[in-house]
Amino acid sequence: MKGFLLRLAAKLAAGLTMVFTVATFTFFLVHALPGNPGDAAYEGYVLGGMPPELARAKVAVVYGFTSHEPLVDQYLGYLGQLLHGNLGVSISYSGVPVTDVIRAAVPWTVLPVLSGLLLSFLVGCTAGVVAAVRRNSRSGGLLSLSGSLMAGVPSFVLALLLAFLFHTLWNVLPYGDTSDVTIAPGFTAEYLGSVATHAVLPVATYALLGYGSWLLTMKSSVASVLGDDFILAAELRGIAPATRMRYIGRNAVLPLFTTLALSVGHMFAGSVLIEDVFDYPGLGNLLLKSIGNRDYPLMGGAFLLITVTIVVANILAELLYSVIDPRVRR
Amino acid sequence: MTDPTPHHDGAATAGARPAEVEIRDLTVVYRTEHGDLPAVSHASLDLRAGEITGLVGESGSGKSTLALSLLNAVPAPGRITTGSVEVAGVGDVTRLTGRRLRRTRGSALGYVFQASQNSLNPLKTVGKQLLDLGRSHEVEDLRGLVRRAGDLCERMGLDADRVLDSYQHELSGGMRQRIGIVLALVLNAEVLVLDEPTTALDMISQAAVLDIVRSVHRENGLATLVVTHDMGVVSEIADRLAVMYGGRIVEHGPAGELLRRPSHPYTRALIGATARIVGDPGLARALPGQPPDLTTLARRGCVFRDRCPLAMPVCEESDPALSEWTPGRFRACHAEPAPADRAAAVPAPRTQDDPIGGRP
Ligand SMILES: Nc1ncnc2c1ncn2[C@@H]1O[C@H](COP(=O)(O)OP(=O)(O)OP(=O)(O)O)[C@@H](O)[C@H]1O
Ligand code: SF4
Ligand SMILES: [Mg+2]
């Protein structure tokens, strides 16, 4: 128990360090850019006839810092704002606080990514168990082959292929935005149905992307558990096959939880390309747009949120691990 | 060892009772890149209720393979090619498949296997695994099962409540070994097979586990097979002894006689080398030369001939069959049994010194 708490604390500390590093990095990135955007904006306002005092105040609101203070003060001011959950004001969505812009986009990334991840984890792991148990048969070989193939496909190729097949060619699935624009948002069957069908392509892409590597990882994990003494022992005691499968599955899935946490990060990173292909207004799309618009506060906020998500996923994985593995628990 | 009665001289009762397990002409091969190589060749052996049979031999002689055949559980790439294993009330185990085979394992035949230290699922408590065992064998009265397991635990000096609520990593090696025995016996198996039950244990746990095996065996009138390469273990608890070499049973008979007057040249060398240091597991040092493995095993003639001091031309040509050379004793060798052997085959007088010195 003590060891577990210690590890959890270490994860937390590492996570906070990571968040801090990313925050610092985005701050200095904005400053290191040619023609510091804060300065550029300030000059723009002054040239536009605004009094310098007002222009400075306006820059301070938008960027969370004023470029006329010493760098250290600006940095500390920025961190102070961060602690209060203030990420500044978006430039491209003029005047809207960054937190609001992000909050609107978050569910459209988190829900598809998590459901895609869960789906690929469940399907991939199940297929991995079958592939390992039947590794000497044709069906097992085919399963493994499907895993190897899928693991090698780049995300945007997969997304484009699915969009082409299911939208352009067969026209069975909608694509673009989160729902049909002609349907008013609300708690109606029509709207929810539209949201669901629009989510199919992104979710399927996330799911297929993960499938191959889950299958292969699970297969090798199962193969190693199959060689463990207690599996033979269970067989020699006449334990029922279904029970033995559960023994194998639970022991084999355990080492995969670390990978699961890491892949949350990968998936969020992947959402940048995939949401772009499907024109799906999630975080990844927002990040890409903010880069295109040089909306630095928004960019920094999106980066920060992705970092926080990865940290939280890591900690959740640690907790999950400890629920399943008694050797960690007590 | 508090028990005063010697159980080495069980020859008188041998043959009186029908055998609980009859192994006949059993051959087990492993598929290798050199083809199918026999790890057990034409082995025949009886296990009787109320008797502990010791199966000894150097590492690689095929002991575990033979023991696993009793449950028709030789792992791939191994398979049984000839022979039968008749178990009383079950039939020929080598012909069983599927559900019937599975149900026989555990309920009729209890197996404590070589790596019993790791025979538990690390993610479940012992109690939950006990319930899994009960459900797998469709035990109606699971409470009764837990009670019986608890009794067995207490008998073995384990705190039943604590043990059933523990995970494997919370138990010591000796405790795990005992739990392996509890799980092998809790469904009232009449045949108990223990593969190297003490090898991984320290001396004190070894003695404790052997004591437990002996008393549970007695009380339940089991037919017990103890596989070991430790002559100390067999001299402690075996009533009968079978000696394996190169996949063959080269000699078997009542343990006391066999230890005092070994007849087969291999058994003699084995016992000669360990007589002074009973309990030393370093049997590999017992003989000049290397024990054969599957690839170097002679395909023709006696498998022991390269290391045998008595080898003759005929030993190159034909594989000696196991035969009863004097009542109750079997050996597989072309050489004439020495006259002294025949003389000593009658139970030795109690006053004679035990040349093995295995008993305190
Ligand atoms: N899976 C396998 N594939 C090929 N050969 C095997 C396999 N398992 C065992 N053997 C061979 O079969 C022979 C008998 O092995 P077995 O494990 O029965 O010996 P053992 O007498 O129990 O030895 P030990 O005292 O080391 O446990 C050995 O030569 C071994 O190398
Ligand atoms: S058969 Fe020949 S080689 Fe084999 S043990 Fe007997 S004497 Fe030795
Ligand atoms: Mg063995």
Image (cartoon, coloured by chain):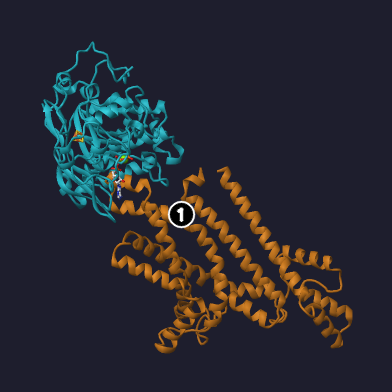
Residue type at tag 1: Leu
Q: Which chain is cyan?
A: B
Of residues A221 and B102, the one nearer the viewer is A221
Q: Residue at x 35, y 35 (%)?
A: B284
Residue that mark 1 sits on:
A254
Of residues A267 and A78, the one nearer the viewer is A267
- Report x, y in % for residue A8: 59, 51
Q: Is residue A114 left or right of residue B213?
A: right
Query: Which image quarter is the N terminus of chain B in?
Result: top left
Q: Residue at x 59, y 78 (%)?
A: A285
Q: Is residue B171 left or right of residue A40?
A: left
Ligand 3 position by quadrant: top left
**Chain A appears what colour?**
orange
Question: Is A182 located above or below residue B243 in the figure?
Answer: below
Q: Is residue A77 visible?
A: yes
Of residues B133 and A55, the one nearer the viewer is B133
Q: Is residue B344 left or right of residue B134?
A: left
Query: Quarter-wise, where is residue B300 in the image?
Result: top left
Disc 1 on helix, strand or loop?
loop
- Report x, y in % for residue B314: 15, 38
Question: Is B213 located above or below residue A33 in the figure?
Answer: above
